[in-house]
Structure formats: C-alpha cells, structure tokens
Amino acid sequence: MVEISAPVSPVSEGANQADSVKMSARDVCVYYGEKQALFGVNLQIPTNEIMALIGPSGCGKSTFLRCLNRMNDVIPIARITGDIELDGEDIYAPDLDVVELRARVGMVFQKPNPFPKSIFDNIAYGPRIHGFSSNNKTDMEELVATSLQKAGLWEEVKDRLDQPGTGLSGGQQQRLCIARAIAVKPEVILMDEPCSALDPIATAKIEELMDELRSDYTIVIVTHSMQQAARVSQRTAFFHLGVLVEEGDTDKIFTNPDDERTQNYITGRFG
Amino acid sequence: MTTQMIFLILLLAGVAAFFYGRMRARAMTVASAEKFHSRPGHHGFYVTIWTMLPAFFLIVLWLVVAPLVVRWAVTNSLPEAATASGESVSLIMTTVEQLSRGVTQLEEEDFDRISSGAMTVQEVMRSKGVLVGSDAKPYMLQAAILDERLSANSHLFLTLFAGITMIGGFLYGRRGIAPRARARNAVEQVMTLGLIAASTVAILTTAGIVLSVLFESIEFFRMVPPADFFFGTVWDPRFSAPGRVGGSDGQFGILPLLWGTAYISLVALMVAVPIGLMSAIYMSEYAGNKVRSIAKPLLEILAGIPTIVYGFFALVTFGPFLRDAGGLVGFDIQASSVLTAGFVMGIMIIPFVSSLSDDIISAVPQSLREGSYGLGATQSETIKQVIMPAALPGVVGAVLLAASRAIGETMIVVLAAGIAANITLNPGESVTTVTVKIVSQLTGDLEFNSPQTLVAFALGLTLFVVTLGLNVFALYIVRKYREQYE
Amino acid sequence: MTDQVQRMDVTAGGRVAKSEKSKLVKRRYAAERRFRFYGMAAIGTAVFFVFLLFGSIVNNGWSAFFQTKLDLTVHFDESVIDKSGQRDRMTLLTANYRKLAREALLAELGVDPADRPMRRKAEALLSRGAAIQLRDVVMDDPSVIGTTQKVELLASGNADALMKGAIDRDVPESRRQLDNRQVAWLDELRAKDILSLAFNTGLFTYGASSQPETAGIGVAAIGSFFMMLIVVLLAVPLGVAAALYLEEFAPQNRWTDLIEVNINNLAAVPSIVFGLLGLAVFINFAGLPRSSALVGGLVLTLMTLPTVIIATRAAIRAVPPSIREAALGVGASKMQTVTHHVLPLALPGILTGTIIGLVQALGETAPLLMIGLVAFVVDYPATPMDPATALPVQIYMWATAAERGFVERTAGATIILLGFLILMNSTAVIMRRRFERKW
C-alpha cells in the first residue's frame, strides 16, 4: 500500500518547483498510543499556493495538518516519526522552539474560537506576545486594521472594535480568527475545515478571502468538501486510512486521478 | 542586619533586577538586527530568578543548618564536669540560650561580681532586664558568650554570602540576555517547578497527619498496651499529675467511646437518610424547576452552617425540648443524650445525603425511566422498582460518606452528647464519643508527655483510619456506579 | 413528564378487565400520591429545620444587641481619685472608681450609704464593668476630675435580664435573682428615664470577660480576621498553583494519580485531625507560639486547600479546549496560554471556590480547640503571633458558660457569625450568576 505513494511523491513533478517549496514532509508517521494514525506521508507544500487536503473522515488529514505546526504536541499520547521541514529547517529538531514555529505557521480551527475579549484584543494578542512594539499604540491599531482588512472584516467591525469577539456571527468569528492568525504575520496558514461550521454565504466570503491571501501566504486547508477543494486550491492531496494516496494539481486530481481510490472518492463512491 | 531585612533586600533586588533585565533586553532589541527569541519581560524575569533564587535557597539552608552547628559547638564547649553531673544537656542549653540574649550587655565589673560570688548570675542578668532561671551557673556564662559570638558571626557570614550569591546570580543572569537566549523557556520551567511544588503540599499534609499522629500514638502505646486500649471497656484516664509521667493509673479503653460514636451516628443516619433520600427523589424526579431552585439552596444552607451553631442549638433549644417532651410521655431523656446529639447531627448531614443522592439518581439513564413508563408504570413505581434498585450502590456510597462525616463530627457532640463514657442502649442517656475525648484530653493545661494527653493522638489515629477507610470504600462504590452508566 | 406518565397509565390499564381496572388504577394512584407526599414532607421537614434553627438562634440572640444602661450623674471626686493632685498615671489607674459609681447610684435612689445591706442591694444593679468605664473616662481626659458629669454606665447582668423580660417578675421573690426592692428600684429608674435599653456596641468591641455585660467578640473577630488573611494569602496561591499543575501540565501517571486521590481524601478527613496535625507539627515540632492566630491560620489553610484545589480544577476544566488551541495556534507558549487565557477565564470560578473555602474556615471550631485558641484573651492581638481566639471558638466558650446573660451573647455572636457567612455565600452566588459563562 505504501509503495503507491512513491510515484506521486513530488520528486517527479516537483522538480520545477524545488526552489519554491515552503514545507516538506518526509516519511511522517503518527501514533496515538498504540494506534497508528498516519503511515509514511511524503508531501511538499509549495510557496504561495493553496494546498487542499481531502479524504474521508478519520483519514488522517487533520492529523497531518496538526503535525505541520506541532499542535499534536498538545496531545500527550501522540507520537510522531519522520521529518517535516519549514524552509529546509527541521521543525521537530530538539532545539527548535515550538512557540516560534507556531508564530510562523499559524492555524485556523474548525470551530471559530475567538477569545472572550474585544475584537481589538483578539487580534492584538498574538502580536503582543510575539513582541510587536506594544508601546506604540498607533502601530498596533494599524496592524489590527490591516489584519481585519485582509480578512475582509474591517468594514463590518471597524466601529465596534471594543465589542467582544464572541458577539459576532459565526462567519464573522471565523474571519476574525483568520485575521488573528494573519496579525502574527505567519508564513504558512493552516486551516482545519474552516468553513464546516458556517453557512454558504459566509463560506463564499472565506473562500474569496483565501484566494486573496494566497499572494502573501502559503495556505494548507483541510476540507471535507471536494467542491471547496476544487474551487480554492491549486494543489490537492488525497488521504485515505492514514495514507497519502495521491497528490498533484487540483485540476488533475479532480479530472484524471492516477489512483482508483481517488477516483472512487471524488465520484462519491465512498466517504 | 536582621533576617527580615535580608529577605526584604533580596525582594527589592529581585524587583530591581526585573526592571533592569527588561530595560536592557529592550535596548538590545532596538540595537540588534537579529530578532529576539523572548520578550523583554521574560529576560527581566530571568535575571530576577538568577538574582533571587540561589540566594534565597542559601539563606534558608543557612538558617536551618547554622543554629544546629552553633548548638553543637556550644554543647561541646561545656566543661565535662557539667555534663557529668547528670544534669540534662537540653536543660543547660535552654538556660545558655536565655543567657546569650543578655551577655552583650554585661561589663567587666559584672563578671567580677559573679566570679567573686557577690551576686549570682540570675541577679546580674535581672539587673540588665533579662530573666533567667535560678539554675544559671557561672560556667554557663562562658558558653553563652560563645553561643552569642558564634551566632553573631554566623549571621555576619550569612549576610556576606547571601550578598555575594545575589550579586553573582544577577551578573550571571544579566550575561544571559542575548537575542537567541531562550529566557522564556527558562522562566517557564522555573514556574512549572513552582506549580509542581505547590501540588505536593497536599501529599505533605497527608504525610504530616499520618506521621504526627502515628509517632505520638506509638509513644502512647509504649505506656499503655495496645490491647488495653483497643479492647478495654472502661474509659477512666484520671488526671495527669506532674511527677507521675510514664506511669499511668488511668484506664484507656476505647470501646465505650466507639460505642457512643457509633450509636450517635446511627441515630443521625436514621434521621438523615429518610429525609435526605426522599428529598433527593422528590427534587430530581417530581419537582419543577421553580421548587427545585428554591428548595435546593435552602437545603444547602444546612450544609453551610458551622457545626458549632448546631451544637449550640442542641444545647439550648433541642436538648431541653427533648427532655421536656420526654417528661410528658414519661420517658426519661437527659438534656445531653444520644437522641439530642444524634438528631441534631442528623439535621446537619441531611444535605450530604440529599445532594449526593440527587446526583446519583440523576445519573440513572433516561432510557431506564422511559422503558418503565412504556410498560405503563406510574412514576412512583418506576422510582421504587427501577430507579432506586439501579441507583442503590451509589446511594449506599452516599450514605457511607455521610456516616464518615457523622463519625468525625466534633462540636455537636462536644456540646450535646455529654462526657460520661457509658455503654448503654438507652437513647435517653448521655454517652461520649471519640472526638469529644480528643478535645477534652487536649484542652486545659496538661503535661504533654503523659498518657492522658497522648491518648488523644491514639484516638485521632483510630478516627483517621476509620473515616479514611469509609471514604475510600464509599468513593470506590460511587465511582464504580458512575462507570456503569458512562 | 407527569402528563406523559398518566397517559401511559391509561393505555396500560386498558388491557385489564374494566371492573378491576378502576380499582387497581385507583390504588396505584393512591400509592403514587402517597409517595409524592412523602417526598414533599421530607423537603418540608428539612426546610422546617432550617427555619427552626435560624428562628431559635434569632429568638435567643436578638436581645444581645441591646444592653441596659444607666445614665448617672457622677461626681468625679478628687479626694477619691487622686488626693495628691499629682495626676500620676498609676494612681489614676488604681483609684476606687467603684465607689464613684456606687455613690452616684445611691444618690439617685436616695439610699443612705451607711446602710450596708441596702447599699449592697443597690450596688448589685451596677455592672462591675462600670468602674472600668469611669476609669477610661478619667484616663482619656484627667481634667474631668473634680467635676460632675453625666455618664452612661452598664447595668448588671441581672438588671439587664429583667429589662429584657428574661427574669420573670411572677416568680416568688425567694427564687428570683432580684428581690422586690431591687425590682422596684429598677422600675423607678426606668420611670425617671435613667435606665434604658440602648444598642450594644460593647458586643462588637469587648474581649473575653467573666461578666456577660462586658464580654464581646472584638478580640475573637480580630483573631478570625488574621486567620482568614493567612488562609487567603496561603491557600489561594498554593491551591490555584496545584490545580493548574494537575489540570494543565501534569502528565498522567502514578504520581499525579496519587496526588488526586490524596486531595479527595484530604477533603473528607475530620477537621479535628487537622487540629492534631497542627498541635504535633506547628506547635510541638516547629515551635510556633501556641494560641496564636498564625498557627490557627496555618491549620485552616491546610484544611481549605483541598476545597480551593477542587473548585479551581472544576473552573479550569470549564474553559473550553478551543480557547487553548486558539492561543497555541497564534504561537503562545503553554504557560502564556494558561496565564493569559485559561486563568482569567477561570477566575470567577476560582473566586467562588475560594469564598466557599473561606466560609468553611471561618466557621471551623474543632481544630482550633486543639491548638490552644480556647484562651481567655482580653486584649486585641496586634500581630498574628499574639494570643488570640476566633469567632466560633468564642461562641463555644460562651456556650459552656453558665450565666443566662451568656446564652444571649452566644446566640448574638452566632447571629453575627451567620451574618458573615451569609454575606460571603451571597457574594459567591452573585458572582457565579454574574460571571457564569456558557460556552
């Protein structure tokens, strides 16, 4: 089973992109206690593109995503082997500081999780802990404003920045969380099914937003919606039962996949 | 410099170090092109930790060890004749320590007076405003001088070394401020260690309880054979009189106390279990939100009232009431009796039974109720035949927890149960309990090392073991019960 | 739910023969009603006990807040107080103030000071504390010597009891604490408006005393205050730190399991055992001063610690994991996540738990008896190292005293203690309502 992933490993078609690889995973396995959740995943994430991770539930796509900024460290029984590099630097190196890593690789979660603080403080929190010149008030205001603008939320909330972030609607909350992630100026943004708790209109807004963000950031999105993956991403990776089955240009994956399982999944035979 | 002063200076230095570290880190952030790993505040804390912690540990260690060293040196300096005369070294040392407080005020002529025998040591010291016992002898004065000098020296060195450690720590911490230095990680590690230390206090408390009660109990069992204590049927400790240390004329049979404790707890449970359990059933199965929201806090008030208030209530209101009521029907009830104490204690533990049972009954899955209703059972039939059998183990656990409360309760029985150690079946008579006797053996001016006092610890040990056993068992039952429905 | 059940009963009954059905159903409904009545009766009984308890305490204790006083015209006779005119402190302190008070009363009643039996009877209406009151007046301002002043003096316990109706006038004279003559005097004084009931400030300010009218909870309240201060300063930081460690940092292993079990069992150890611990460890081993608020505070700290830890853990657990993920996701460290987000969000819960722990500590008596806080303390403790006593212990000591006046004081002090507890509990409830956050 594992050898199937070999041909799609980026060595073949990644040659022309070698200079623009942002993150790369080599032979990543994850165990939760006795149970193995990921089996030898090899994947290269290109710079300034949106990479979608798709697959049926429990296939390991979220697990893999959480490896990319070491959120799995939070789970005591999780264990990971293999290498993940960010700009050629091993992110699991013992002397690497996980906090610095997460500042570079931000994350947006499935359910919007704003802090129960004001909208302003939600955004300003990250920059503050990372030492953004907090003594300069106008700078911070500017940063908050640009982050909200980038997240497309500015027009809606600019008059009520001191209101609690929990008072926004679901879609607004999620964009607030994206703004919060952007404010830290990450290089990569990981999104774990960011639209699964939202209505279609809010989803459309977020998808639009992702496309705009692509020019500045590398985005990895986990989604259970194949349409969404097709709409927003340039590259797609299909996971099944903890194995990376196939990865390639989104167009190719959705029109002419190499693997039968991918074919079955995108045509809706399982998952 | 007093010890408090040293601690105060250390504290101030720590605060100053924080501001210095933060300032320096800030300045370096601005100057250096490289991005700093940690925030200036972290660097500030880092310097503070290095400034304060090593010095702090040094001071604490010194304060524990130095007095022992000084004492050892002074004891060794005592003339052999003194220790050979059979006087207790610890008594001599007590006097020496008293003397050492006043020796600095002595002048040449005072020593002359003492050596010529014109005045005793005690008289000289009194003229300086220092009170010492009449057993103060001239040779002790020499020891006191040594003691005073060593202590002063020790303190001087302490100040010196603490200062050096503090400054050294500060310099070391200051050197650590650098762009790539992981001050945050270091600071957070120290904080985590602090949290771990805090979480061990609970363990230390238990260890403290077990060890202290155990040691004093062993001391007691050296004077009174354990068999006499555990199987004796007569409790009559007598008074401890000075000079009779070691020997015991009293009898220390715990059985009457255990009987009293058990009898009163039984009465309490007979009051609390029906009322508490029926209240819980009504509140969880019948009552609407409104009744619940009023009745539940009202019942919980009973749990919040201090036990001394229950005791007072039993003493002035309930005891006399029961006595008069008993008199009307021709039943002789003393004002302090099993009934009085048991009944009032029963009121106290109603909320324990009711709130625990309420939780347990609520944990019975809805599917069981629906199954029973679906068969056409009424609500009370469902409760009696389906819910209660299912909840029984949990309810038993709740009752056991309440029983352990009742057994360990002190103030109600101190005020309302009486002090006579009887084994009687008559609930109108007064009995006494383990807790009452712990209080009465330990209050008042008693000599500590007599069996009359130490027996309180043996009683405490018994109480601790019994209640702990009950608790562990009850919690085990309740947990098993919960797991069943998870 | 009730409707549903009744409907089901009807359908169930439908299968039984018609004639039997009504009988059986009737019986079953009767059983249902009975059972329901038992439940209501149980709650009713429990609630009745709550009111009985409070009613009995208030009934016994309301009168403690009032005190009978005598407005006497006292001549501060220089020849009695300080013949020499030196105004020497020692002389002023030891002068015969009793005589001044007595003469003022005798003059008011028109009793001849030479008539010894009558004099003694009249004197019995004055509290022994009256002399101290006069002394305090003189010590405050020695210039009153030689003048005549209106002074409010304490009446004796028996006079106070008569005023409050605690001494029954219908009891035969031989068995009454006050004879007919004394009762007549008191009535006369009352008619002249010299004798009156006034608010009893002494209850709040005095310390221990062998006479009920000069006994108060002042000293005990300060002792309790010191102990609560120590509990807050020690139990809260220790408890919160321990809870944080166990909830947020601790690995799941034997050691943390041990700590968990330990805390749960510690919460159920009888309080008196903590007293034994305090006696053996703090007093006998560490040599801290007996009868001091410091040792009391330490023992209460160890007792409240499990409560604080358990409450804090519950509050921390109520903070949803998504908040932690959000903070970690923007690159906050574990410690930053906890101190910036989890702790502030758990704060209301922690405070509520702390108040509940304090309530428990404030009402605790038994362990304090073990460490010598049952002391007759007259002076206010200046530091936690001084001899002190605590509110509930003061109640205990008064409860075991014999005089009728002390029963009233005991109940009065109990009302004050309960007042404090209710105040603290309501604060906790209000805070819980106000800051409760639904996630």
Image (cartoon, coloured by chain):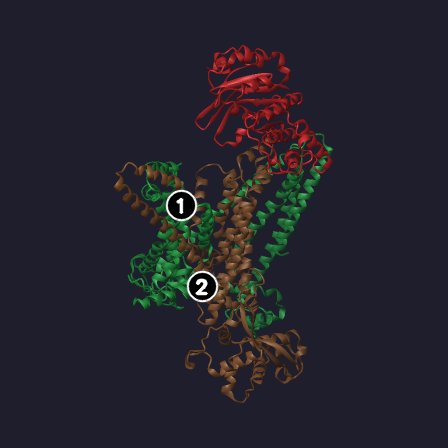
Q: Position of residue A146 (x, y in %)?
A: 70, 29
Residue A65 at what x, y percent from top left? 55, 24
What color was chain A assigned in the picture?
red
Q: Colour of chain B?
A: green
Badge 1, how many Cα within 10 Å: few under 14, some, many 20+?
A: some
Image position of A199 with respect to A13: above or below: below
Instruction: From the image, state whether disc 2 or disc 1 is nearer to you.
Output: 1
The answer to whether residue B251 is seen in the rendering is yes
**Callout 2 crowding tier (Cα within 10 Å): few <14, some 14–19, many ≥20:** some
| Chain letter, brown in picture | C
Position in image of residue C237 (x %, y %):
55, 48
- Quarter of the image containing the N terminus of chain C? top left
The quadrant of the picture occupied by the C terminus of chain C is top right
Q: Chain of mark 2?
A: C
Labelled disc at residue C56: 2
Q: Which residue is mark 1?
A: B286
Q: Amino acid at mark 2?
A: Ser
Residue C83 left/right relative to C410: right
Residue A94 lies in quadrant: top right
Mark 1 belongs to chain? B
